[in-house]
Amino acid sequence: MIERFEYADARELVSYAKEAEGKYLYEIDKKDMLKNTNVKGSVGHIIEASYFGYDINSNAEADFADVGIELKATGISKLKNGNLKAKERLVLNIINYMKEYQYDFYHSSFWTKNQKLLLFFYEYKKNKYKKMNRENTQIVKVELFEFPEEDLEIVKSDWKIIHDKIIKGEAHLLSEGDTLILGACTKGSTASKSLREQPFSDIKAKQRAFSIKQGYMTSLVRKYITNEHLESITSSKEINKKSLEQILEEKFSPYFGMKDYEIAEKLNIKLSNGKGKVPHLVSHMLGIKGNDLSKIEEFEKFNIKFKTINLNHNGNLKEHMSFEQINFHDYLNTDWDYSELKEKFESTKWLFVVFKENENNKKIFHSIKLWNMPAEDINTHLQQFYLDTQKVLRQGVVLTETKRGVSNNLPGTKDNPVCHIRPKARDSADQYQLPDGQMITKQCFWLNKGYILNIINRKN
């Protein structure tokens, strides 16, 4: 029997929690929970049960209700370059659609349970079996977190977006892309089957939980652990008065209609011809010194990714939009609800920077668009693309020799209005192995150029 930790006040609780810094799970685990591979949320549960001696529960109130503090464990991953980032979003409490709409923010289930978070940051490592090395998981940092005032205003706005969708009978259309910090992520072992009633529609909605997005969690890793400073393009005062899209529009609008080299001259920078040409221009238009746009405070915190779009002089897109290479083994073995593809387009906002060629083939800065994929497209076309790809992989990819090279029966541009698969490799010899053992030229995920064109031509 583990003795329950008793505390006089929040300060004493946090002081005891901080004594766990540097400890490994095997040192904390007094209930042999590490031996039970079925323990869900194992790190948090081991800390709660073995370190604090509390029974694991799913109460509506905070774990340490008398001081209003909720305990949460959150993973940190190390990138190849040595930088640290949050491994994933921080999942909070399940959203009860039938009740949540009745509350204001300060009486909501989210705020009641999560206004103060006792965060245990642990380093996520894999063992030789590519699974989490739970025994040697180390607690890196413990912090009592409360949203700073400027971020709390954004969280309130995010909560209202979620709240308003429930009231409109659109809980089934919730998407993490709708919001900046506070998300509504799918939750359940089989999210597509974990359906819940909503109050103002007969359509059942996927079970979802409030969550703090991965980008924001990474900003906390930087704040508490690495002390890395990122440049900011706005202020907390401005971002609480205007939308992020308004702020970006105001930053870029003085350059609309200018040729790329004219922008460079105005900013007194040298225009390169390499891949960093547009990021270099964009960063200076935003008043940022470096070319790495992921190092902008707001881009990291709100998970904004940058893409260049080039239109010809007729206003047509020159090419489809490419993303990462496809890992077909992951596609085959991962359910849609837990796929990287679904998470990417649910949680990411994309800043499209649009250039248009004139009759003399000079690039003119045309416009910007801050966009996230609508839930309707994610839950229909994107999901169907993923399932169609899985089907082809299960049946075996058919490779056919043609005059132009080797074709395949993976989903192409004519098979889906949103996206497709096509090669993106140095040459035909740049190949990797399919799950069925065949070799194929490296393939990428692409958004169809017609789909992209509709997005940038849309007025809202």
Image (cartoon, helix red, strand yellow):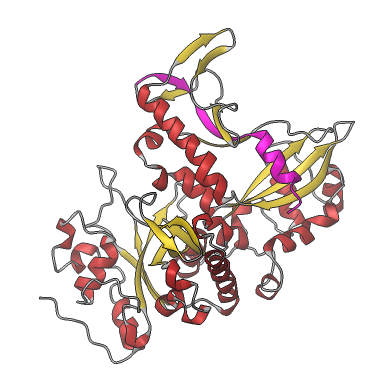
Q: Quadrant of residue 128?
A: top left
Residue 281: say if magenta.
Answer: no
- In the rendered view of the protein, which quadrant contains the N terminus? bottom left
Where is residue 191 shown, x and y percent of the image?
38, 52
> Residue at (39%, 27%) from the top-left corner?
393
Q: Quadrant of residue 72?
A: bottom left
Residue 162 vs 130, above or below: the answer is below
Residue occupying the far left of the picture:
1
| 383 and 74: which is toward the camera | 383
Residue occupying the far top of the picture:
403
Where is residue 21 shown, x and y percent of the image?
31, 71
| 395 and 424: which is toward the camera | 395
Residue 119 vs 91, above or below: the answer is below
Where is residue 107 shown, x and y percent of the image?
47, 81
Residue 114 placement, left or right of 19: right
Total marks in image:
0
- In the rendered view of the protein, which quadrant contains the C terminus? bottom right
Residue 424 placement, left or right of 74: right
Residue occupying the far front of the picture:
202
Residue bounds of the magenta highlight:
437-460
